[in-house]
Image (spheres, rainbow, N blue to C red):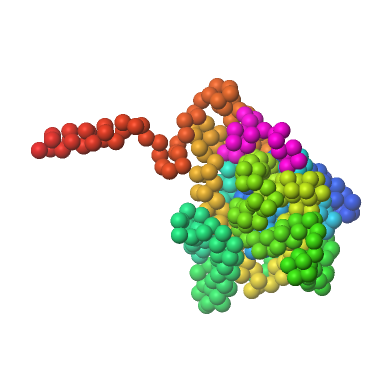
Amino acid sequence: AEQSPEEAADDKKIHMKVDADAPWSERMWEVFTTFWPLGFVAFGGPQAHVAILRDHLTVQRDWLDEEQFTELFAIGQGLPGPTSTQLVISTATSRAGPLGGLMAFFLWNLPGLIVLTCCGVLIDEFVNPDEPPWYLAGLPPAAISLVFKAFYGFAAKLDSLQIWLALSSSLVAILINNDENIKPSSSQWVFPCCLVLGGLVTLIDSKREKPFSVYKSPSKGWDAGDDTTFKRIGIPLWVGACIFLVWGGVLALVIILVDVAEVSNVYLEIFETMYRIGSIIFGGGQVVLPMLQDEVVPDWMTKDQFLQGLGLAQSMPGPLFNFASYLGAVYEGVPGALVAFLGLFGPGVILIFAMVPFWARARHNYSFKAILKGVNATAIGLVGAACVILWESAIENAANAMVFAVALTLAIVFGVQAPVCIFVGGVIGAILHPDALDLGQVPYCEDQGYIKDPDEDDRLRKLAAFYFTGMM
């Protein structure tokens, strides 16, 4: 007998051996076995990371449903710090408490941290980032295909009002990243404002007699009927409030020590620089780059060293914030790398731990859920914008486009898991690489527009003259 679509989808799930309310040690082991391989395959930037996490935690493992996942994603979008890493922490914390969240954080970032620290220490002996090795050529386009899959999965469930909110935030994000008169760094305040406005729109709409959207009554899921998940998280509300104060206190303290008291300590200087930047960065890893460059060039390193490290960081799995470990390593070796890593990641990690208990308690509140409905839609629009922006940066030639097409087909049509899609993309990219078959390598575009044959303009003029003469 043929399977129903629901049964076919259920066959693709990894059926959990650990119950959601199993002993803490078993849930910690489940978090470890889930996240340790992901740090090695998390290529493609934050939106691709979200796609990987969605596949593993929502589609395959049923840790949480789509609504819960997008709520946590939206919360990460509204906080400073690396969104994908905050999503890792919040989902793991909801499963095994704060220690589970911390373990998932280190597993997620460990490969990039180790490699980039080594590169920073041994920069002169490492591979030239301007010529990526053959074995990395297919990974970016394969990872970007997962962004398209994630956006399709998210957007397909939006209603008409949410679609308009998503479209609006998507247009804003595309404009910010592709306009000569608007600085890309403005996203660090524009994106949070978009999320706030999206939440206000749905909150106001929910109070109308005939709202444009559909607002469900509080669900009987995690927290509405009992405190099971709140207890699993293990962070009381008063502790969450204290964590907020810790973040602000540390920020004020390091600024006072460095700028007011003028304490001379190189590691304090590194930590203050990174912690300050990490506390004000909204919008992901790309936004942090101009601020980092202003701070570390030329005091810590040359511009060439900065750009070489950036090329390496973009070819590594994990968040672009791992770039901090490279910067610290170039400046002060391994200790500098660890201090810079903790400084840049610290604010985002602290704030997501502070926010999770409030989310777990409030998510069954009608008004809060109405606000999150708009915030979720606005955040999904940012994923759509990423599809446009990342396509241009990742798909440089026909070889990249072929890798993208194969990976997207495997992911959407055949339901292949994200790591396998990325691996297959890597294999195809390596085969098509100039060092192998050298196929599909003519670039679509150069820095300033499409490539033209030197005689093309002359041929076009002659062709136009020919048609004009014929018409006469």
Residue at 70%, 46% in the rendered image: 318
Closer-to-camera residue (249/125): 125
Q: Examine the rendering and report whether any part of residue 160 can be seen.
A: no
Rendered residue at 36%/32% (across/down): 453
Residue located at (50% from left, 74% from top): 210
Q: Is residue 257 visible?
A: yes
| Quadrant hosting residue 246 | bottom right
Q: Residue at x 70, y 50 (%)?
A: 300
Q: Toward which corner of the image does residue 404 lie, by quadrant?
A: top right
- Decide if residue 371 is on the left or right side of residue 354: left
Name the spot of residue 436 as percent of width and height, x first: 58, 22
Percent x, y for residue 264? 80, 61
Q: Quadrant of the N terminus?
A: top right
Total numbered labels placed on residues in the image:
0
Q: Nearer the viewer, residue 338 or 361?
A: 338
Range shown magenta: 119-142
Question: Which residue is outermost to the left?
Answer: 472
- Determine whether 196 is above or below 16 in the image: below
| Residue 182 image point, x, y percent | 48, 60
